Image (spheres, helix red, strand yellow):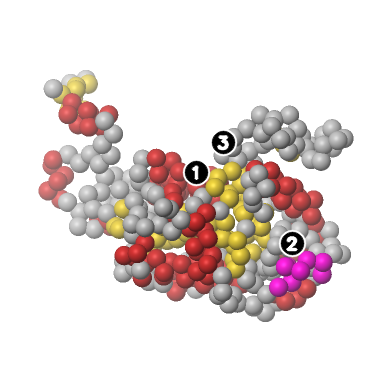
């Protein structure tokens, strides 16, 4: 039986049944099968592709400043310049083309800044039939603000808890009840840090902690670059012992919020907010924008077996402190940082050094990691 509309054949009943039953890879019409693509580069982005590239690691970066190579670097450029990411793959359904290392089967992407772009780019990649991501490890490698109570700029931080700083109620602090410490409070509660909080529905995700610990143990003793200017910048934080240390690798939790906040008061809020949603199990260390969106897409894709969410890692490196030092106001410090993050270049080098070490471990020992994920019994 064939379904008709206005005298034209739309779809065969057997094909419709396959679609309804959840068949994801419906072949193209018979007349197209005589021109089977021999490369993913022959496939039209968004259309069904009968061939796919195997992917061992996806490197997820968020932004680039100018060109992909040869100018002032941002998160993607060092990966592009220092690795054989020679295959450029059109990706018009997202922010930036993809680049693939055929020898090591590493795919690198630039999602664009912000939760929305990160989530949609990740979802677009996960649903793209040109790639086999079923066993791919995902490494988010991006810059971040870092809490001077815990680390110094240039330090690299592995996270297991991803806390969202946007999903909430808010009353302007000038109108909040006098006994409230903040006007920011969780949805479905009646006050800030209400102990009767609901189960998180996007406010917090916990990723594979065992994989995070494995990555940390693998990289904790790496010597990170202590570039010119870092010592001078961290010396301003005279009352923060960890902020004055040369860059190092550590574990700590991540707060994702679309607003680029700054200052001691908001830094205290970030610590309290992460502590609240992790039930005291997580310590706020890094602040950026994207992770809760990126991981939500990964979680959805895992449900249809396109990816394995247990293979997701988050690495952030401190490009700036999340609050001002003594003698400066929050506004003064933020405006100074906006002229150029004090730890930008150091954080990019740390991301590449630490993240690249893990990428190499996985790809060079694929027999060990293809079917066995650290942290998963």
Of labels 1 and 3, the one closer to you: 3
Q: Is residue 240 magenta?
A: yes
Q: Residue furthest bottom?
A: 228
**Front-lying residue, 133 or 117:** 133
How many labels were placed on the picture?
Answer: 3
Provide the secondary structure element on which disc 1 rests. helix
Main structural element of the magenta stretch: helix, strand or loop? loop
Tell me which residue sits at (31%, 53%) in the image.
132
Tell me which residue sits at (31%, 65%) in the image.
367
**Front-lying residue, 56 or 150:** 150
Of labels 1 and 2, the one closer to you: 2
* Residue at which label 1 appears: 296
**Image quadrant for the N terminus?**
top left
* Residue at which label 2 appears: 149
As measured in the structure, the alpha-carbon distance from the residue carrying label 1 to the one carrying label 3 is 10 Å
Looking at the image, tell me whether mark 3 or mark 2 is earlier in sequence order.
Answer: 2
Provide the secondary structure element on which disc 3 rests. loop
Q: Is residue 165 left or right of residue 240?
A: left
Q: Check residue 201 in the rendering and tell me which mark sits there, or answer none.
A: 3
Looking at the image, tell me whether mark 1 or mark 2 is earlier in sequence order.
Answer: 2
Q: Is residue 334 left or right of residue 35?
A: right
Q: Is residue 276 magenta?
A: no
Crowd around label 2: few <14 · some 14–19 · many ≥20 (10 Å): some
Tell me which residue sits at (56%, 60%) in the image.
158
Q: Is residue 322 left or right of residue 144?
A: right
Q: Is residue 21 visible?
A: yes
**In the image, residue 300 lies at what x, y percent?**
43, 41
Q: Which residues are magenta?
A: 238-245
As measured in the structure, the alpha-carbon distance from the residue carrying label 3 to the one carrying label 2 is 29 Å
**In the image, residue 16 lies at what x, y percent?**
22, 28
Q: Is residue 373 above or below residue 68?
A: above
Looking at the image, tell me whether mark 1 or mark 3 is earlier in sequence order.
Answer: 3
């Amino acid at each position: 039986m064939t379904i008709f509309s206005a005298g034209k054949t739309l779809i065969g009943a057997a094909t419709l049944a396959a679609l309804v039953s959840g068949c994801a890879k419906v072949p193209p019409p018979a007349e197209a099968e005589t021109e089977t693509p021999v490369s993913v580069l022959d496939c039209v982005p968004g259309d069904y592709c009968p061939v796919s590239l195997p992917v061992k690691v996806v490197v997820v970066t968020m932004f680039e400043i100018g060109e992909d190579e040869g100018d002032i670097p941002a998160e993607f450029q060092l990966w592009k310049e220092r690795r054989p990411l020679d295959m450029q793959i059109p990706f018009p359904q997202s922010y930036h083309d993809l680049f693939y290392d055929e020898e090591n089967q590493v795919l690198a992407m630039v999602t664009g800044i912000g939760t929305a772009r990160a989530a949609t780019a990740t979802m677009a990649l996960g649903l793209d039939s040109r790639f086999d991501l079923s066993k791919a490890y995902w490494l988010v490698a991006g810059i971040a603000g870092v809490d001077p109570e815990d680390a110094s700029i240039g330090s690299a931080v592995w996270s297991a808890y991803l806390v969202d700083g946007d999903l909430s109620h808010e009353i302007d602090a000038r109108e909040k009840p006098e006994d409230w410490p903040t006007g920011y409070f969780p949805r479905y509660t009646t006050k800030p840090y209400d102990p009767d909080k609901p189960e998180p529905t996007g406010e917090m995700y916990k990723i594979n902690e065992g994989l995070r610990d494995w990555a940390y143990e693998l990289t904790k003793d790496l010597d990170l670059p202590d570039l010119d200017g870092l010592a001078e910048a961290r010396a301003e934080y005279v009352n923060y012992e960890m902020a004055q240390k040369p860059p190092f690798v550590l574990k700590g939790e991540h707060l994702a919020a679309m607003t680029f906040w700054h200052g001691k008061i908001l830094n205290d809020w970030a610590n309290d907010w992460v502590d609240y949603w992790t039930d005291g199990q997580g310590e706020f260390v890094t602040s950026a924008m994207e992770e809760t969106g990126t991981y939500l897409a990964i979680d959805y894709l895992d449900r249809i077996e396109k990816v394995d969410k247990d293979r997701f890692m988050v690495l952030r490196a401190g490009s700036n402190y999340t609050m001002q030092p003594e003698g400066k106001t929050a506004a003064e410090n933020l405006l100074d940082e906006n002229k150029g993050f004090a730890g930008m270049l150091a954080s990019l080098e740390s991301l590449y050094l630490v993240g690249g070490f893990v990428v190499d471990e996985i790809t060079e020992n694929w027999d060990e990691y293809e079917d066995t994920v650290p942290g998963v019994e």
